[in-house]
């Protein structure tokens, strides 16, 4: 049996990777959203959240395999979103819920 392919980002770049745990509701439950390697960075994540690309984000984790760390960044992302809300005319209800839930942690 051959080993499973690595899910560790490949390449010479040392970069942080961000993943979103979503609640799909009903019988579907929660799952880590599939993310293209090029879109797993902080700027793209924030833009995707603001654009409503996630159904109901629950938690966000970041990791950097080159540096050997991983951590929950939910509160930090929620703080950044809160700062950007003043520039927006409308914010998705699911994103407001995410920010409120993160503030209670």
Image (spheres, helix red, strand yellow):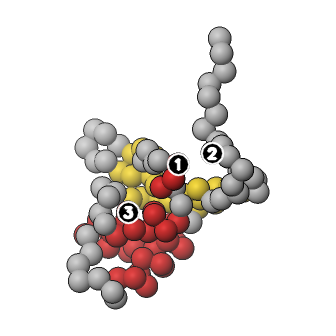
Crowd rating for badge 3 (residues with CA inside 10 Å; few <14, some 14–19, many 20+): few
Q: Please name which of the two marks, 3 or 1, marks the residue nearer to the observer.
A: 1
Q: Earlier in the sequence, mark 3 or mark 2?
A: 2
Relative to 86, 4 lies left or right: right
Q: Residue at x 31, y 39 (%)?
A: 28
- Residue for badge 3: 48
Is 87 above or below relative to 96? Answer: below
Q: Which residue is mark 2?
A: 9
Of the two numbered discs 2 and 1 on the same chain, state the one appearing first in sequence.
2
Q: Which residue is mark 1?
A: 37
Residue found 31% across the figure and 48% down from its top: 24
Is disc 3 in contact with disc 2, using a CB cutoff of under 8 Å? no
Q: Residues within 10 Å of mark 2 (few under 14, many from 20)?
A: some
* Dot 1: element: helix
Q: Residue furthest top?
A: 1
**Alpha carbon distance from label 2 to label 1:** 7 Å
- Residue at (69% x, 55% y) in the render: 13
Is any atom of residue 19 visible in this view?
no
Q: Is residue 90 above or below residue 98?
A: below
Badge 2 vs badge 1, beta-carbon distance below 8 Å = yes
First in sequence, mark 3 or 1: give its number: 1
Q: In the structure shown, which secondary structural element does the residue marked by tag 3 occupy?
A: helix
Report helix, strand or loop for mark 2. Answer: loop
Where residue 89 appears, as percent x and y from the top left, is: 23, 83
3D distance between C-alphas at marks 3 and 1: 14 Å
In the image, 87 versus 74, the foreground residue is 87
Please, is residue 34 above or below residue 53 in the view? above
The quadrant holding residue 86 is bottom left
- Cα distance, mark 3 to mark 2? 20 Å
Q: Position of residue 33 (x, y in %)?
A: 42, 47
Give the position of the N terminus as an image quadrant: top right
């Amino acid at each position: 049996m051959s080993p499973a392919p690595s899910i560790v980002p490949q390449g010479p770049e040392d970069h942080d990777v961000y993943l979103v745990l979503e609640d799909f509701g009903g019988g579907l439950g929660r799952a880590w959203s599939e993310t293209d390697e090029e879109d797993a960075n902080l700027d793209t994540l924030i833009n995707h959240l603001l654009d409503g690309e996630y159904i109901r984000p629950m938690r966000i984790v970041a990791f950097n395999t080159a540096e050997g760390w991983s951590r929950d960044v939910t509160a930090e992302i929620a703080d950044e979103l809160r700062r950007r809300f003043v520039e927006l005319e409308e914010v998705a209800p699911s994103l407001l819920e995410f920010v409120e839930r993160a503030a209670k942690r």
